[in-house]
Amino acid sequence: MKKLIIVIFSLILLKNVSSQTNIYSKNSTYSSDVICNLRDNKIYKKKSSYTSDIFCQIIDNKIYKGSSSYSNDIVYNISNGKVFKGNSTYSSDILMNVNNGKIYKGNSSYSSDVIATIKDNKIYKGNSTYNSDILFTIDGNVTLIELIAIWHTFNYMY
């Protein structure tokens, strides 16, 4: 019986342990170069886990400002690889789209409209894959909506 209680307690603790994904400046993986972290569908400043340091959060397919969940605070709505402004789903409100490892301006798929390239957990400026053009490095796999939340944080926080 004692072993059963220990096993149940351990499972409860493991369930409550959340995975953290760090985002590093450029090509670094040094702890001192963490620019933000992703934990429990929230992007926190640097290595913080304080509620006051939440930059944005993900609920369903939407990214909200800070720790808000109000519809007025929706920054992006993501659907089928397209990133819409606010809560919109109108084609005129497509800000960017992600396709084949590239982030494009608006609804474009032209190479001249590539904003960033995604390769091996690194995000490169434009169409480049040169080390000198790495904007940030993600220390794990992320979903499309998590990537957009990280992209938003990187662009508006730094």
Image (cartoon, grey):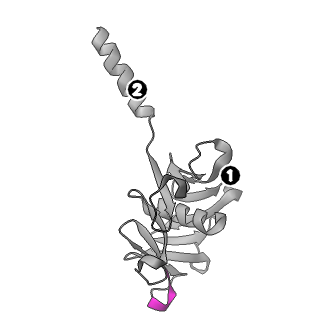
**Dot 2 corresponds to which residue?**
12
Residue depicted at x 56% and y 55%: 36
Residue depicted at x 38% and y 58%: 141
On-image quarter of the C terminus: bottom right
- Does any portion of residue 125 appear in the rendered image? yes
Give the alpha-carbon distance from disc 1 to disc 2, as whole Å.
Answer: 31 Å
Pick whichever, 105 or 36, lies toward us. 36
Q: Residue 9: horizontal and vertical position, in percent? A: 38, 20
Question: From the viewer's perspective, is 77 left or right of 144?
Answer: right
Q: Residue 85: horizontal and vertical position, in percent? A: 62, 70
Local secondary structure at mark 2: helix
Check if mark 1's residue and mark 2's residue have beta carbons within 8 Å.
no
Earlier along the polypeptide chain: callout 1 or callout 2? 2
View extreme (top): residue: 1
- Does any portion of residue 67 appear in the rendered image? no
Numbered disc in front, either 1 or 2: 2
**Dot 1 corresponds to which residue?**
70
> In this picture, which residue range is highlighted in magenta?
110-116
Dot 1, crowdedness within 10 Å: few (<14), some or many (≥20)?
few
